[in-house]
Amino acid sequence: MDLVQTGAEVHRDLRLGSQARLRELLRDHGDRVETFCAHDPWEFARYQGADKGSGPDRSV
């Protein structure tokens, strides 16, 4: 993490625990789930249409 993110971090242990659970989810179910960053407006926009039947653009 960069300096700004580290400075804004409130609960390091909770963040690291969440990361570990996400990695475990992908390891165990990566064939059925995808992760994305909701803080990236372009990436998030691709997934917003998923509930409308269009799904994410997987051509990238």
Image (cartoon, helix red, strand yellow):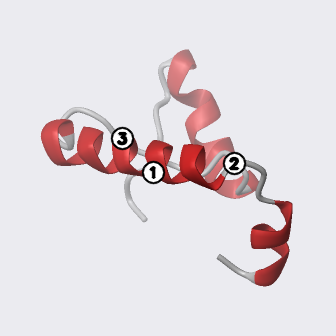
- Cα separation, mark 2 vs mark 3, equals 16 Å
Q: Between residue 53 and residue 33, name the one nearer to us.
A: 33
Decide if residue 12 is on the left or right side of residue 4.
left
Looking at the image, residue 29 lies above or below residue 35: above
Decide if residue 10 is on the left or right side of residue 47.
right
Does label 2 or label 3 sit earlier along the sequence?
2
Looking at the image, residue 45 lies above or below residue 60: above
Contact flag, marks 3 and 1 (Cβ < 8 Å) = yes
Q: Give the x, y percent position of residue 16.
A: 50, 54
Which residue type carries mark 3? Arg
Classify mark 1: helix, strand or loop: helix
Query: Crowding at label 1, few (<14), some or many (≥20) Cα neighbours within 10 Å?
Result: few
Q: Give the x, y percent position of residue 52.
A: 56, 17
Q: Which residue is mark 3?
A: 21
Decide if residue 33 is on the left or right side of residue 53.
left
Decide if residue 3 is on the left or right side of residue 30.
right
Q: Give the x, y percent position of residue 39.
A: 73, 52
Name the residue located 22 percent from the left edge and 32 percent from the top edge: 32
Q: Which residue is mark 2?
A: 11
Quarter the C terminus occupies: bottom left
Looking at the image, residue 37 lies above or below residue 4: above
Q: Between residue 2 and residue 57, name the one nearer to us.
A: 2
